[in-house]
Amino acid sequence: MNLTFLISVYNEEDALPGLVENFSALWARTGAHVLFVNDGSTDTTLLKLEALARGNPRIGYIDLSRNFGKEQALAAGMSAIPSGQNVIVMDGDGQHTAKAAGALLAAADQSENTDIVFGVRKERLYQGFIDRTLSNAFYKVANSLLRSPLDPRLGDFFFARAHVVDTLKAFAGSKLFWKGVYSYIGYERAEVPIDIAEREAGQSKFSLFRRLGLAIDGIVWLSKTPLHIISFLGLLISALSFGFAAFIVVQWLLTGVAVPGFYTIIVLQSFGVGIIMLSLGIMALYLSVVFENTSQKPGFILSRRSRLPQWDKPDSDRSS
């Protein structure tokens, strides 16, 4: 099997030695290649990756010019992997173990019809109460807006066959939400229950604010429903303002009661706000379509300090 481990790292100088020690036997047994993506680390992570690559031609790394975020780091790694490679995507903080990766491979070997195997987290005790609460709230909101619900148990730890990797490479925009991509692409999938290990070294670099930012980007990336809600809200406010105006006119005609000035101000303000929200909603719908089809901003930029693994030719090429 042509297999590559794709590992994104950011300031993981303390975690890298333990990760390599944990996976060395599995990498040797499977003959796998390893591609690290250094997402603009500011510590000695890049130096450690350079040392690893010098000692083993099957290990390589991509160095991004700055920190672009995990979503784009994975996109950069996938874009560098040649066709014909099956891939295991995992984190570089040591929480994904060689035992769990072996379980993914075993599940893939059991059925050739399985295109992608996800490691499903049994528990989320490694997350704090606030993280779990916000995460659950995000999935409830997101799934209420989506046709294909997201599974909160799934993360960026999975085995994908070569044709799936080729499909994932097509998603190269400047804004990505991989969990949404996994839901969007379909394919035959399997799930393997796994345990998430505690970090052996270092601290999580994925802060609460970055999680919230990713959640907002994810909802916008996955669905245009919020824009439809804004348009509907504009129509509703406009209808209410018209109804209120009609009520005032009828009241004046039937009772002769003079219309107070602040009533007129309220009606005009409500009508104006409704029209503005309706207009913004319609323009946003068009702008979102234009942006999605014309944006040329790269999602990531590579530095010159990259060194790819020496990939073998795919089996199909060897026989030709």
Image: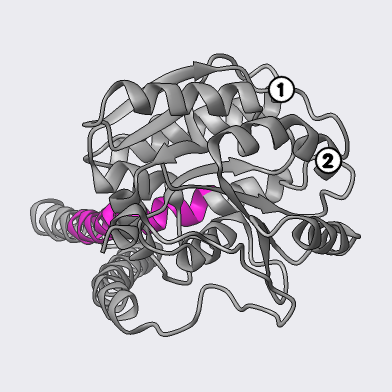
The front one of 148 and 108 is 108
**Magenta: main secondary structure:** helix
The location of residue 48, given as percent across then percent down, is 86, 57
Reply above or below: 224 against 136: below
The residue at 74%/46% (across/down) is: 207
Left or right of 250 on screen, residue 147: right
The front one of 235 and 137 is 137
Which residue is labeled 1 in the image? 197
Which residue is labeled 2 in the image? 15
**Tags 2 and 1 touching, CB below 8 Å:** no
What amino acid type should be assigned to the residue bearing mark 2? Ala
Left or right of 10 on screen, residue 60: left
Answer with mark 2 or mark 1, whichever residue precedes in sequence. 2
* C-alpha span from label 2 to label 1: 12 Å
Q: Quadrant of residue 44?
A: bottom right
The front one of 131 and 281 is 131
> Tag 1: Cα neighbours inside 10 Å, few (<14), some, or many (≥20)?
few
The location of residue 157, given as percent across then percent down, is 52, 36
The location of residue 263, given as percent across then percent down, is 34, 61
- The reply to whether residue 175 is visible in this rendering is no
Q: Assign the N terminus to one quadrant of the image.
A: top left
Q: Is residue 238 magenta?
A: yes
Q: Is residue 134 magenta?
A: no
Q: Secondary structure at mark 1?
A: loop
- Residue interval drawn in magenta: 215-240
Q: Secondary structure at mark 2?
A: loop
The residue at 32%/67% (across/down) is: 277
The residue at 54%/36% (across/down) is: 30
> Tag 2: Cα neighbours inside 10 Å, few (<14), some, or many (≥20)?
many
